[in-house]
């Protein structure tokens, strides 16, 4: 391979950075030679403004730098692709067991005010150049056994962005506060967490000090950097780009968030009700999971106890909120509230079958960029919680016939290197259709300006309850039952078959009048732990903790139903997280340069008479709750027989209903998959009140829905 013709500077052809730089793997351990590696790798410790752990020194944030050697040698200034991923320095894989262990444990009182110690910055005693630092680098700084997860090495995402390295970009990775090698605490959804990654951008832009050592004595500059940064990543790593964008930090030119969270409250909850997986409802679970700093052998017992006390206090603070929105607890993680600060562009990527990070999140992010006036584009695929290229699984899907990384390359080449390639001419929405995954459609705007109303022809009332056994439902078959019939747990309202195709685009709003029919209010509706949740997390919906009635839940589904089985792409596991893929072309995803290709894949389909298009959860105790997360702050005490108006906003979708198919609105009580606290109650629905406003892509006539054979 060494007879290849390489370049010392980036080369752009057809608007894309070309793979003209040599590559050396960073996972070679003892065989890694910093003196000859074509990719220069080293770690720095960026100084923050905070002293979260109260040791009298500003907390440092460990950062892994990978950059083509030519840039470090001074032949050009490299732009940076930055992944802020709290998992990347290791995880605590015993999270579920840990939550049970600490449920009844006593900790010292931790005062969140102590996180705000004002400490003067360090004064460096010397400096070191990037090349000098890299020549001293030990690969065990970035590739080592993960003590919290014995089945992996860290950074396991080390080569996720090799495509960009051979094209001249620097690749920057950090796990932020609370991770191994960094100081501070992992504080999910906080300003501290957001700012840790903001500080890294500032260092890359030349506005902040980083050190070559954990003690913070020898400073080092990113003098190979052109100061321009793009942030990307999926899930947690797709959340932090949006969080940092809302600070307006200089140097952040664009973000490419994949399945990123816009608001932590509505990631965990929805209109006053539980939304997420039962065992992971406390933010302290995720904070512990990402706190690889627990494995820092240099920490004293007191320091370890301080981390644990902080996490326990984080649990207690959330328990006071129950499932309702509280501005003090959730406000910092409601990033969309700061749309006015955004100064960068965005290429927003989301799977329409993602039930981990809901599609509501991408839509709220999109709306924030609309408010900001900044350029944004959206790519929507039919997959679950994935990136269109999955390096760790050796496959990728094509985006309208193109490689995903080529699209990102075009985007960041424009924003980081100023290449005039027409990247901004992309349509606002590029979406893979649900009826043919090879077909992609475009829209000039996510907002359609059209809606179709589904209005009930029903009369009288329907009563639904929470008796799973009588309904014959479980976590394994809930969607199957809901999609096909009414039961004691759910009432379906179904349209006549459509004569022509109709495309839904946006957020469906279900309106209804409902009342609590029956239930043991005095005893919190006799709660049961059906999903083996730890006792601490189980206190989330307890009136004894929050002081109010909470989580009298309804689950709402919009389904595509047909008398004949049809092919569709949908998740196949009870947790609704997996859509299998099939290889259609080995080596079909080209990475270029010295890098191996990935397989081109397509999503597997299932053959059923229904497909859940979108869903939502809401608490009858929160009739004021609407689309915006903060509207779920006020809850009421339900009284039997007292009706209230509800407006339930389902997760955003883009879906075409084909001729001969019908839409079914399903109003249910509990969803066993997402049910942390099983309660015994029944709800009465005014059938005539049920209607839904459905955004559609063109003018479409309204339709009636009829209650099918309910046993209510």
Image (tube, rainbow, N blue to C red):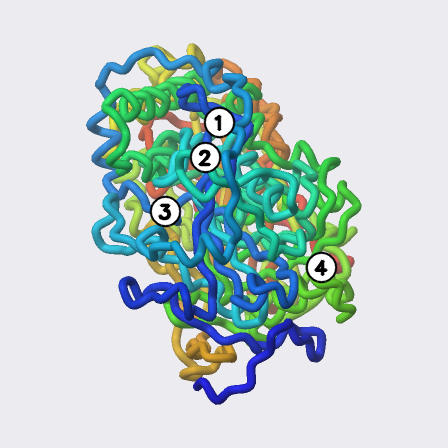
Label 4 to label 1: alpha-carbon separation? 33 Å
Q: Residue 372 falls in which quadrant of the image?
A: top right
Residue 315 locus on image (x, y percent): 37, 23
Secondary structure at badge 1 equals: loop
Check if mark 2's residue and mark 4's residue have beta carbons within 8 Å. no
Q: Earlier in the sequence, mark 4 or mark 1?
A: 1
Q: Which residue is mark 4?
A: 415
Q: Which residue is mark 1?
A: 58
Secondary structure at badge 2 equals: loop
Label 4 to label 3: alpha-carbon separation? 29 Å
- Tag in front: 1 or 2: 2
- The label on residue 216 is 2
In the image, residue 525 above or below residue 340: above
Quarter of the rendering occupied by the C terminus: top left
Quarter of the rendering occupied by the N terminus: bottom left
Check if mark 4's residue and mark 3's residue have beta carbons within 8 Å. no
Q: Residue 474 falls in which quadrant of the image?
A: top left
Estimate how packed mark 4 is, as few (under 14), some (14 to 19) or many (20 or more) residues with alpha carbons within 10 Å. many
Label 2 to label 4: alpha-carbon separation? 33 Å
């Amino acid at each position: 391979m060494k007879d290849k013709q390489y370049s010392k500077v980036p080369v752009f052809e057809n608007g894309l950075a070309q793979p003209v730089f040599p590559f050396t793997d960073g996972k070679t351990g003892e065989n890694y030679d910093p003196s000859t590696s074509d990719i220069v790798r080293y770690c720095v410790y960026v100084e923050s403004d905070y002293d979260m752990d109260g040791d009298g020194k500003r907390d440092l944030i460990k950062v892994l730098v990978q950059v083509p050697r030519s840039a470090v040698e001074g032949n050009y200034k490299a732009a940076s692709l930055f992944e802020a991923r709290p998992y990347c320095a290791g995880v605590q894989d015993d999270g579920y067991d840990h939550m049970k262990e600490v449920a009844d444990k006593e900790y010292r009182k931790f005062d969140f005010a102590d996180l705000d110690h004002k400490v003067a910055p360090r004064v460096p005693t010397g400096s070191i150049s990037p090349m000098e630092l890299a020549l001293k680098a030990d690969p065990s700084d970035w590739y080592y056994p993960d003590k919290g997860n014995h089945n992996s090495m860290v950074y396991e995402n080390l080569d996720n962005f090799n495509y960009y390295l051979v094209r001249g970009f620097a690749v920057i990775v950090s796990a932020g506060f609370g991770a191994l090698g960094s100081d501070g605490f992992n504080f999910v959804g906080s300003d501290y967490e957001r700012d840790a990654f903001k500080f890294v951008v500032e260092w890359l832009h030349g506005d902040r000090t980083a050190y070559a050592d954990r003690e913070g004595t020898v400073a080092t500059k990113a003098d190979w950097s052109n100061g321009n940064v793009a942030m990307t990543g999926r899930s947690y790593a797709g959340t932090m780009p949006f969080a940092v964008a809302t600070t307006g930090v200089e140097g952040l030119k664009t973000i490419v968030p994949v399945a990123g969270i816009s608001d932590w409250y509505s990631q965990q909850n929805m209109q006053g009700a539980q939304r997420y997986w039962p065992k992971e409802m406390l933010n302290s679970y995720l904070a512990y999971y990402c706190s690889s700093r627990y494995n820092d052998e240099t920490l004293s017992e007191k320091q370890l106890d301080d981390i644990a006390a902080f996490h326990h206090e984080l649990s207690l603070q959330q328990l006071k909120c129950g499932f309702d929105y509280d501005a003090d607890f959730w406000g910092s993680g409601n990033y969309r509230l700061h749309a006015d600060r955004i100064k960068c562009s965005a290429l927003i990527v989301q799977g329409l079958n993602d039930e981990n990070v809901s599609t509501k999140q991408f839509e709220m992010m999109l709306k924030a960029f609309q408010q900001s006036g900044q350029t944004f584009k959206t790519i929507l695929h039919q997959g679950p919680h994935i990136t269109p290229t999955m390096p760790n699984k050796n496959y990728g899907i094509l985006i309208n016939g193109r490689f995903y990384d080529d699209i990102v390359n075009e985007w960041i080449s424009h924003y980081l290197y100023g290449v005039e390639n027409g990247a901004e001419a992309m349509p606002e929405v590029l979406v893979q259709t649900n009826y043919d995954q090879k077909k992609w459609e475009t829209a000039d705007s996510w907002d359609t300006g059209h809606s179709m109303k589904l209005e009930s022809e029903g009369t009288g009332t329907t009563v639904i309850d929470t008796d799973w056994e009588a309904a014959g439902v479980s976590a394994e078959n809930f969607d199957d039952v809901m999609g096909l019939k009414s039961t004691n747990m759910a009432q379906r309202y179904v349209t006549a078959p459509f004569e022509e195709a109709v495309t839904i685009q946006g957020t469906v709003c279900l309106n209804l009048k409902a009342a609590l029919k029956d239930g043991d209010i005095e005893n919190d509706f006799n709660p049961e732990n059906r999903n083996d949740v730890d006792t601490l997390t189980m206190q989330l919906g307890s009136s004894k903790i929050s002081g109010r009635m909470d989580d009298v839940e309804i689950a709402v589904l919009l389904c595509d139903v047909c008398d004949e089985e049809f092919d569709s792409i949908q998740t196949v596991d009870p947790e609704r997280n997996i859509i299998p893929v099939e290889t259609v072309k080995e080596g079909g995803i080209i990475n270029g340069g010295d890098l191996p290709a990935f397989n081109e894949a397509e999503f597997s389909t299932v053959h059923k008479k229904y497909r859940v298009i979108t869903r939502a959860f809401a608490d009858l105790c929160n009739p004021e709750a609407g689309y915006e997360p903060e509207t779920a702050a006020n809850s009421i005490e339900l009284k039997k027989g007292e009706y209230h108006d509800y407006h339930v906003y389902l997760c955003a979708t883009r879906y075409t209903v084909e001729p001969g198919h019908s839409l079914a609105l399903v109003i249910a009580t509990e969803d066993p998959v997402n049910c942390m606290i099983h309660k015994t109650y029944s709800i009465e629905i005014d059938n005539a009140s049920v209607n839904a406003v459905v955004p559609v892509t063109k003018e479409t006539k309204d339709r009636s829905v009829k209650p099918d054979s309910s046993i209510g």
